[in-house]
Image: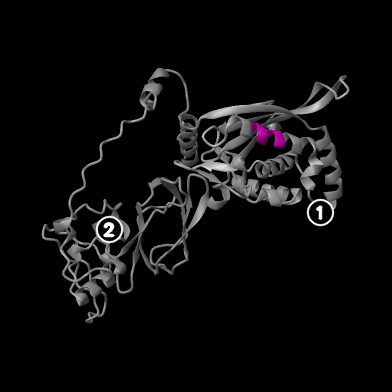
Amino acid sequence: MPTEILMPALSPTMEEGTLAKWLVKEGDTVSSGDLLAEIETDKATMEFEAVDEGVIGKILVPEGTEAVKVNTAIAVLLEEGESADDIDASSATPAPAPEAAQPADAAAEAAPAGGSEQAAPPAPVTAEGGRIFASPLARRIAAQKGIDLAALSGSGPHGRIVKADVEAAQPGAKPAAETATPAPAAPAAAPAPTGPSADAVAAMYEGREYEEIKLDGMRKTIAARLTEAKQTIPHFYLRRDIRLDALLKFRSQLNKQLESRGVKLSVNDFIIKACALALQAVPDCNAVWAGDRVLKLKPSDVAVAVAIEGGLFTPVLKDAEMKSLSALSTEMKDLAARARDRKLAPQEYQGGSFAISNLGMFGIDNFDAVINPPHGGILAVGAGVKKPVVGEDGELTVATVMSVTLSVDHRVIDGALGAQLLQHIVDNLENPMVMLA
């Protein structure tokens, strides 16, 4: 029987995606590992590979289709000996749930060409008239071993019985329907309050001119995750001012020396390094919330928010405490560029224990950032501005001061511990040479 190619979940948060482009056409022969399509997830455009070999018998979802649910059939793959005539109605539309019975008069499967004794037997039918879906190889093995396919539960797409299911079965087993005890239905959870409906909000602005903007996958994900963050994470905030004059002078000296290598360090590169080293100095803060436990990380994997059109990414610089400032600078520039092109792989923007959000470059003096689950904290960085300060000798002077706010998950980090972490960040930035020691 033809195999359905399903819309894959290319990231843990993906529930639907856009089939941006087909890289194959009907009639093409593909092998495992061949590229089939480009799919836009909630975060990036990724290539989708074949896991089986065969011939593309039918494309069910045309390219450019948006909001295709994960596990929806998007194409049909024909095995050796099958033809387009084998594609029945169940493959022409998104497949039903595995337990849904198919009509008894569904089109019969054609046997592989040649008609030899190796051909798969026709698809069996249950006592209730529902058709059983199994691969041709699974049907051949079942016939040889005398196994009733009605007794098996398929592990393939949409409950399809595959070779492994037949090989693991015992001859003479009774159909699962005769032995299984129905599980009691779980009580329905009370719906969470969602606010006014879309129609109710639109009604408020009846008669007023407006443009309705459809949410893409990224914006839906951002809305869901940040709503979750503010509703479920007990945030608290710690604020400090950091004098940047020593850092700016040191940065200028380093950039002159690195000019021949084409490296130009930014203040943000120093902030990444400062946070990474601070997490090593206060290891209890290098942790994430994992539902019923805390995971304490050993490396400092620091995420940095990057604004892109329509949303943002938080690419992760792994082992940041081990990398030089120039290496962090080069890696950050590469990640930011590919983030703006939506070309990051999931492993490049997932994970980390801590994040940095820098709006200082946009002239923002200070702000409070929302923690990105499951991180334990996020540092909101404001602009460095000239301010009057009291010098060490007690006299009034002018210094470049940057305001930062550390948002902390109180389930992971307590107040005094968060204060220690922020103190180390301040010390690193006000004494930048220690970060090279």
As drawn, is 52 to the left or to the right of 360?
left
Which label number is shown at residue 261?
1
Give the quarter of the image for residue 15.
Answer: top left
How far apart are the alpha carbons under marks 2 and 1?
A: 58 Å
Q: Residues within 10 Å of mark 1 (few under 14, many from 20)?
A: few
Q: Measuring 27% from the left and 58% from the top, which residue is drawn there?
A: 159
The residue lying furthest to the bottom in this view is: 116
The residue lying furthest to the left in this view is: 127
Residue 423 part of the magenta-drawn span: yes
Q: Is disc 2 in contact with disc 1, using a CB cutoff of under 8 Å?
A: no
Residue type marked 1? Arg
As drawn, is 339 to the left or to the right of 268?
left
Which label number is shown at residue 370?
none
- Residue 7 location (% of width, % of height): 39, 53
Most prominent secondary structure in the magenta stretch?
Answer: helix
Q: Earlier in the sequence, mark 2 or mark 1?
A: 2
Give the quarter of the image for residue 204.
Answer: top left
Residue 66 part of the magenta-drawn span: no
Q: Is 4 drawn above or below residue 435 in the view shown?
A: below
As drawn, is 361 to the left or to the right of 38?
right
Report the span colored magenta.
418-425
- Residue 421 location (% of width, % of height): 66, 36
Q: Secondary structure at mark 2?
A: helix
